[in-house]
Amino acid sequence: MKNGVKRIFLIEDDRTIAKNLALLLRAEGFSVAHASTQSDALAMLADGKFDLALLDLSLPDGNGFTVCTQIKETQDIPVIFLTASGEEASVVTGLNMGADDYIVKPFRPRELIARIKSALRKSGRVVSALTIGGLCVDTASGVVKKEGREIYLSALEYRLLLVFINNPQSIITRDRLLDELWDASGEFVEDNTLTVYIKRLREKIEDDPASPQIILTVRGTGYRLGGAHASE
């Protein structure tokens, strides 16, 4: 499934955690299939195809190792273990069985999303370069070029651009952008400051900042990415 929406297989027995994770993943543009037990997970693996699995180590009718083995034998997709603190030995076992990464609960949502996108990128299931309006963004190297010339963005400007690139079909509200930038910078970003960052970013990446074609304003709502072409 190298094109279109990426499908995440979530195996987590805690209903509250599973619900919150599903909401987070869908907000990031993923589709989610959820199983709460080992038996359900194995049955769903036989019927569906996925792009990545988020797998809780502790399941009510077994553990994640059996599911991990089945995933690696049948689908060859990245597996990220969700573990409780103090399960270091189990993590090592999981990695030796072919798991690609692990993240310890409780975790920051943005960290989990970053781990997921990194695992998908390494497996060739996400694009690493996007071209739009003469702008080329290589997310693997972090290099941004305009008409072949490298553009230097601040950390927050680059983070802002990534939000649009990672959500090419979505209208991004100002509130969401504020949350994203606050989380990335570790300090509060005010609404007026966001306007300044949008203006600065447009000045660097747009042919005509007064008539933007890359970051478009959606009146009364927020912003969205203009038409783009992505390539692996």
Image (cartoon, rainbow, N blue to C red):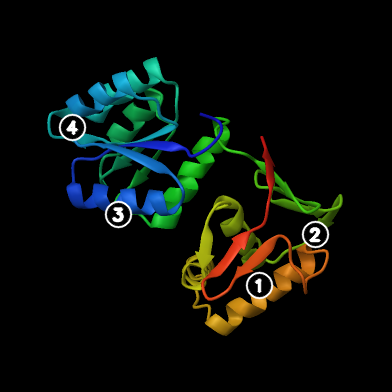
Q: Does 124 sit left or right of 36 as displayed?
A: right
Check residue 151 in the rendering and tell me which mark sits there, or answer none.
2
Asked if disc 4 and disc 1 are in contact, CB closer than 8 Å, the reply is no
> Farthest left residue?
61
Q: Amino acid at mark 2?
A: Ile
Report the front residue among 162 and 218.
Answer: 218
Report the front residue among 28 and 88.
Answer: 28
Disc 3: CA contacts within 10 A as few (<14), some (14-19) or many (>=20) = few
**Residue at label 1?**
198
Which of the two marks, 3 or 4, is nearer to us in this view? 4
Q: Amino acid at mark 4?
A: Thr
Question: In the image, is residue 9 above or below residue 171?
Answer: above
**Residue at label 4?**
37
Which of the two marks, 1 or 2, is nearer to us in this view? 1
Q: Say what secondary structure mark 4 lies in.
A: loop
- Distance between mark 4 and mark 2 Cα atoms: 48 Å
Q: Amino acid at mark 3?
A: Pro
Q: Say what secondary structure mark 2 lies in.
A: strand
Check residue 67 in the rendering and tell me which mark sits there, or answer none.
none
**Residue at label 3?**
106
> Farthest front residue?
219
- Distance between mark 1 and mark 2 Cα atoms: 16 Å
